[in-house]
Image (cartoon, rainbow, N blue to C red):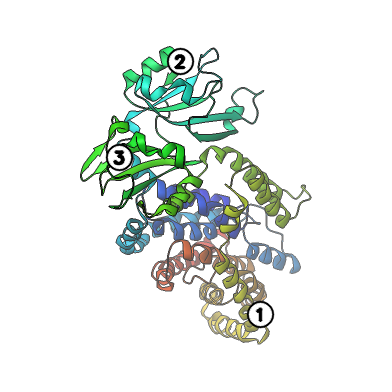
Amino acid sequence: MNRMMLVTGFTGAFISNTGTVALMLPIVVSMANAADVSARRLLMPLAFASSLGIMTLISTPPNLVIDETLREADFPALGFFSFLPVGLICLAVGIIVLLPLTRWLLKDKDAGNNERKQHGKSLNQLVREYGIAESVCRGIVAKSSPVIDRTIAELDIRMRYGLTVLEVRRERSHIPMFTGVGNKFRDISQTVATPDVILQEDDIIYLSGTKEQAARFAAEGGLVLSSENNGLDFYDIGMAELLLLRQSKFVGRKLQEAGFRSKYSINVLGVRRGSEYLRENLADIKMHEGDVLLVQGTWTNIGRLSNDEDYWIVLGQPLEEGARVTLDYKAPLAALIMVAMICMMVFESIPVAPVTAVLASSILMILTGCFRSVEAAYKTINWETVILIAAMMPMSVALEKTGASAYMAHTLAQSLGNWGPLALLAGIYFTTSFLTIFISNTATAVLMAPIAMASAQSAHVSPVPLLFAVAVSASMCFASPFSTPPNALVMKAGRYTFMDYVRVGLPLQIIMGIVMILVLPLLFPF
């Protein structure tokens, strides 16, 4: 969690916190799934860390607001890294405070596990349960191999060598002319080993069987066996469990007679019979009522298995599990696009508007295959959050136009002015923090910055610490899911309630306020 918050905080220093969370959200969810950790533990810190990283002038709009306020009052303009010490302290305090606080979010961990059980086993759980990885060998078709241009059926691998061909994989580099670089940018296609698949040079064949059987086939077929990546990936190919019903026509028949590969284009990788797992000599196994078959096929064919529910029941939600599989081989390309987007947003010399940069990057992500499909990209849009943020805007305008927010700000700030600059700083900080719960942080900063400037001039103190209090407190609002767009973005994905934000965010917000009230006068004296 610490590294995730550090990466998010430093990324948020150069692009908006909303954009940072939008970029990091799918990455963090994938990390949580891979590590079998509740995403609830990570998503709220992700949202908070995006607001904590206020290390540059452009990190949040409130920073620019107070810079403009100082310029208009003929004070020196702020530098690009004027917020760096403040941002580093905020990020450090946030990490220290959130480590114990986020343990509160684990109270519903059992509920999350129950939900996962209802949805079925993960793909990695199936691989471990059936011991598939232990029997998988990886062979690469060499240049002079006699299997080139021959089909799986012609080779008769199952009968001659006792091996099952699980998949044929083809990896192609985007930039083959640059040694080393091309390996970073590549495409991977997976094909189920149907009888008509024709093998080509450099094809990677995944075989299930003993090492001795694989070694004999490699020697005769001109394959190079590799010990790397013996596990299975699920980019184009998936797995599912089928529970055979009593009335199924397959009960009492051998697997080789069932025609799973010819009729359904799927492979049977194992059979669970009670507490026993059968993986060897599958072709000769007679199927019984209640057997659970572990099958492998393309995600499209896996989805079609539910059409024959007279024969079996598809256990769990395999298509939902497949949707969680990340195309990790696209990570370098996605990272390159993201870095290009950040550069377009950071460097003013590049004449591209931030909105244009984000839209162009999104289109590139789709065109380069970082998403499985346009439909998959469309599904990533959280429409509830979009509507929630849009609904917050009229309320923000109403509070501002009616004068309610200005009245609260003037009353609270002026009542503390006579208690000294530190009390005035505290009043401005917590007034801004309170208002940000109801209106956007930019609108709050626009409202409070002139009040802070006028209060500083009345008290004959430097306005810099007071204005920094406005900028920092406008960004450090964690007590409500409606305080900032990042808080709202992670609400549904993390299954958070309003009280989760109060329970974790309010203590952080108060502690951060106390620290900043003590630190800001030291960094920027009155």
Which numbered disc, 2 or 1, marks the residue closer to the eye? 2
Pick the quarter of the image with the C terminus: bottom right
SS at mark 3 in the image = loop
Residue 397: numbered disc: 1
Find residue 219 and report its horizontal and vertical position in percent: 41, 12
- Disc 3: which residue: 253
Indicate the position of residue 239 as horizontal and vertical percent values: 41, 43
Task: For marks 3 and 1, give the one nearer the viewer.
Answer: 3
Res 415 label: none
Q: Position of residue 158 (x, y in %)?
A: 38, 25
Secondary element at image label 1: helix
Up the image or down, 486 lies above or below 316; here it is: below
Q: Amino acid at mark 1?
A: Val
Residue at the image point whose x is 53% and y is 52% from the top: 24
Disc 1: CA contacts within 10 A as few (<14), some (14-19) or many (>=20): some
Question: Residue 221 got which mark?
Answer: 2
Q: Position of residue 322 (x, y in %)?
A: 46, 48
**Toward the viewer: 271 or 253?**
253
